[in-house]
Amino acid sequence: MQARGSNFDEMFDGEGNTRPAYAEYCRWHDEQPPEFLRRKNREADDTFRRTGITFNVYGENEAEERLIPFDMVPRIITAAEWRKLSKGIEQRVRALNSFLYDLYHRQEIVRAGRLPERLLRGNDAWLANMVGFTPPGGIYTHIVGIDLVRTGPDEFFVLEDNARTPSGVSYMLENRETMMGMFPDLFSRIGVETVSNYPRRLARSLAACVPPAYSGGKPVVAVLTPGIYNSAYFEHAFLADQMGAELVEGSDLRVVEGRVQMRTTRGYKPIDVLYRRVDDEFLDPLTFNPDSVLGVPGIMDVYRSGGITIANAPGTGISDDKAIYSFMPEIVEFYTGERPLLPNVQTWRCADKDSLAYVLDNLAELVVKEVHGSGGYGMLIGPTSSKREIAAFREKLVAKPDNYIAQPTLSLSTCPIYTAKGLAPRHVDLRPFVLVSPEGIDITPGGLTRVALKKGSLVVNSSQGGGTKDTWVLKD
């Protein structure tokens, strides 16, 4: 793993020579007049604004809707690199699904002493309602996003797992459509694997996960959204439209004759597979939060009786827990019998006394995260924090150490972005999207590259000022 400060540039080597993956792109780029590139950059902004590709930022006095910044310089991955990544991603996703099955059945990994029981006890993400129940087809993680970072030519690490309700795939698709619309000649010069068929692959994968109550014909798939004020509503509507599925809210659904049914102009119609973008807590007010108006009263009873498939399965959020993440090397080995092909980032569990002491002594050099945190919130990036911020975070850490893990400040790879002064390196990560069904594991060649648009910043989350890029996987 490279030390912080010696970043691996994915486009240029240390002597300024273009790396092979970018050779043809750089030739094309150098042929373009500067004014042409400036115009295309403005055109990209206009496209995203016209399409309405926005997200909501919370934490201010009131939610603010922002345009997601898009950078028109693609992030390029070779076919050989992608084959290696795909094998590691598939291994990890298989292990996650086996792990979730085990957690809600015999808990063999706990019995074997490979995972502390304390990580489950009192963990809100672990659902007692799922104990002893096997989802249709044995699939818990129908849609998974695995966040990867790169630190060198052959060094990729898993930063975190997203198996609850992973988001961002609509931006992957819109990024590609925007690039193909602006630079069609580029795609005729460079062979790039397609991502545009993801909605069709998603629909096929979900349709393969029908419940026991499925009565034949074309499976009915619907997308459950919390509504227009949710930060990812654009994506919910986009995917439903692209799949040819119904976009529904909790108020559109009710339990009729043992099935979850949606209101239509011809009365109520049973749903076979519900792709839910509502968190567990709000899914069923009769089982979880009684004040929820986002879910469907009684849906968990229908689910457990085989009347519907819920994707992803309730209770999968336990695998997103960052304390659980720290045990993923053991989890992969326990369920696959193999060493992990994609390593974790080194992680200190602050619940451990010795680890906590180390973290407190080195706060200024580490990244500290809440075990249930997401979106870049609730974290400390030591090297870019003030002494006052570090002191305040130290108090929170001492008060509740089991709520945090810490990691080194990685030297994340950089990819160039377009600026008025030319290409400039910025840090990136990658979220590939994985579909899981009884028919197998399907990994879309590419994913969502998030980029820290501020010079020197390591935070790529859109909620924290990051942007996105089109991700190209080259054909052989």
Image: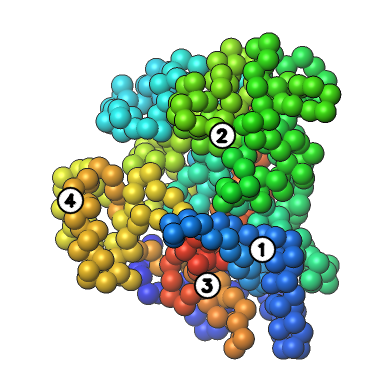
Residue 79 shows in this picture: no
Amino acid type at image mark 4: Val
**Foreground disc of the pair 1, 3:** 3
Q: CA distance from mark 3 to mark 2?
A: 35 Å
Q: Is residue 373 left or right of residue 341?
A: left
- Pointer 2: residues within 10 angstroms few (<14), some, or many (20+)? many
Q: In the displayed structure, would residue 366 be above or below residue 328?
A: below
Q: Nearer the viewer, residue 237 or 442?
A: 237
Circle 3: element type: loop
Up-down: is 419 above or below 435? Answer: below
Measuring from the top left, give residue 416's x and y in whole percent.
58, 75
Colour scheme of the picture: rainbow
How many numbered marks appear?
4
Residue sitting at x 77%, y 14%: 215
Task: Pick whichever, 121 or 441, lies toward us.
Answer: 121
* Inter-mark Cα distance, 4 to 2: 36 Å
Q: Which residue is mark 3?
A: 453
In the picture shown, does residue 476 fall above or below 384?
above
Q: Which residue is mark 2?
A: 294
**Quadrant of residue 73 in the image?**
bottom right
Q: Amino acid at mark 1?
A: Asp
| In front: label 1 or label 4 | 4
Q: Secondary structure at mark 2?
A: loop
SS at mark 4 in the image: helix
Q: CA distance from mark 1 to mark 2?
A: 33 Å
Q: Which residue is mark 1?
A: 470
